[in-house]
Amino acid sequence: MKKIALITGASSGFGSIMATKFSNQFKCIDELYLVARRKERLDEIAKTIDKPCKIIPMDLVSTDNILELADMIKEENVCIKILANCAGFGIFGDFDELSDEKCMDMVDLNCKALTILTKKLLPYMSYNSRIINIASSAAFMPQKKFAVYAASKAYVLSFTRALNQELKGTSVSATAVCPGPANTEFFDIALEVSDRIPFYKEMFMSDAEKVVDKAIKDAILQKEVSVYSIPMKLFRALAKLVPHSIIFKFMSLGGLL
């Protein structure tokens, strides 16, 4: 049976980096299934990968498309060694400035698509398979001007941790990746409403490749949560120990929010 890695959001950012890393690091994978809206970008990425790639141009905001993808996997009778749910986006700005469509698309892509796809594909995962879900450091506490995005990523973090507990003893594990700001195309989309991101997000910008390297290592080790960089680890600890109302007040006084 053919062993595959399926990556959503594979046309850019963490998804495209994971495609390359999986190809280089996992000899057991026979083929990569690359899923994203932009076919031309997927074609370009596939040319740089030394393993066969199946290009699946698909917008996972649509439930029909998610179910179509699940049916495709069922019909092809493959074994999924890695499911990487990387598709997602955020819009930075006041909630009342965002369009209804953008708000719902964030929830649909960041939460619904990840949930349904994981549910449908879990039966095709075998011994020692891994689920990697891209959450965010925004999942650690509510984020002013990132209200919907942060809430959606809090869902991803909670869902992944609970799923990982349910999978104990099955040899399949789930890891939530919680990066801080990283040098991807994320902010090209996020700044659709606002002029610029807060300076502290620019200050703590991480190297996306290093984030992915740690995510892969943590997934192999079956860690439930993967957090790259000392500042983001400190932020996670702070969000656990200090009431969020106090953090909000401090950040507002400091001009950070």
Image (spheres, helix red, strand yellow):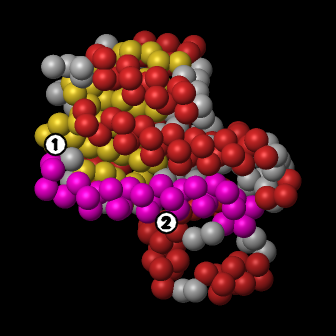
In the rendered view, would you say 50 is above or below 26?
above
Q: Which residues are magenta?
A: 143-171
Mark 1 to mark 2 CA distance (whole Å):
29 Å
In the rendered view, would you say 186 is above or below 138?
above
Q: Quadrant of the N terminus?
A: top left
Asked if the residues shown at circle 1 and circle 2 are in contact, with their CB atoms under 8 angstroms apart, the answer is no
SS class, disc 2: helix
Mark 1 or mark 2, earlier in chain: 1
Q: Quadrant of residue 59?
A: top right
Front position in the image: 227 or 9: 9
Position in image of residue 254 (x %, y %): 75, 79
Q: Quadrant of residue 76?
A: top left
Question: Can you see residue 174?
Answer: yes
Position in image of residue 101 (x %, y %): 76, 41
Q: Quadrant of the C terminus?
A: bottom right
Is residue 138 located in the magenta-colored stretch of the structure?
no
Question: What residue is drawn where x is 82% and y is 46%?
Answer: 99
| 69 relative position to 1: left or right | right
Question: What residue is drawn where x is 58% and y is 41%?
Answer: 109
* Amino acid tagged 2: Met
Q: Which mark is residue 232?
A: 2
Question: What residue is drawn where x is 47% and y is 55%?
Answer: 156
Q: Which mark is residue 20?
A: none
Is residue 156 located in the magenta-colored stretch of the structure?
yes
In the rendered view, would you say 107 is above or below 147?
above
SS class, disc 1: strand
Magenta region, mostly helix, strand or loop? helix
Find disc 1 in the rendering and name its residue.
128
Position in image of residue 230 (x %, y %): 44, 67
| 222 relative position to 13: left or right | left
Question: Can you see residue 24?
Answer: no
* Amino acid tagged 1: Asn
